[in-house]
Image (cartoon, rainbow, N blue to C red):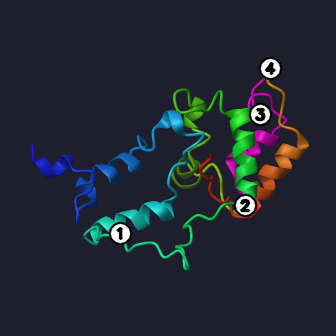
Amino acid sequence: MLNRERKIVVPGSPGNSRLIQRITDGSMPPEEEETRLPRLTETELEILTDWVKGGAPPLPPEDPDNPTPAVVPYSELAAKVQDIFDRRCYECHKYDVAKGGIKIMNYRLLVTVRQVIVPGRPDESELFHMITSTDEEKQMPKFPAPPLSSREIATIRQWIEAGAPAFSKKE
């Protein structure tokens, strides 16, 4: 096997870069840290992949007077939804359980891969239908857990209507 396949970043070759491979396959950041370290969004992954394709040039030094803006800005609404998911959904939908294949803290999986959340359209979002369903077979969370409160549902609806901004890192 070629040594270049084991490099974290292979300039010009995202497919041979372990960094891109591990982000794409979901093993990075570590799944056991998913409540604290969110997955990259599709936009962030594209930026990183383009950087590697472009030869992975050194980044310029940070200018304290003109800091680089975050690709995914902090969203208080996303933080509230992340907290609801952590408290009410995570036990059954965490990385090592993932009932129904849903890893509730994996934003990219929810929005891009499985598409159970349609940003801007709660009424077209499968996840929203599950948390608002009156059918015991479809309703989330499952009995005997109590259903989400009207406030929690309203927060999730507002988040989806706002475009489902990405989760942020928890300190």
Q: Which residue is mark 4?
A: 144
Closest to the camera, between mark 4 and mark 3, is 4
Q: Which residue is mark 3?
A: 139
Q: Residue furthest top?
A: 144
Badge 1 marks a residue whose secondary structure is: helix
Local crowd size for mark 3, using a 10 Å CA cut-off: few (<14), some (14–19), many (≥20): some
Query: Which amino acid, mark 1?
Result: Asp
The span picked out in magenta is 124-144
Badge 3 marks a residue whose secondary structure is: loop
Q: Residue furthest bottom?
A: 66
Local crowd size for mark 1, using a 10 Å CA cut-off: few (<14), some (14–19), many (≥20): some
Badge 4 marks a residue whose secondary structure is: loop
Q: Which residue is mark 1?
A: 50
Q: Earlier in the sequence, mark 2 or mark 3?
A: 2
Query: Which amino acid, mark 4?
Result: Pro
Residue at mark 4 to residue at mark 3: CA–CA distance? 11 Å
Q: Residue furthest front?
A: 64
Going by the image, does 152 lie left or right of 29? right
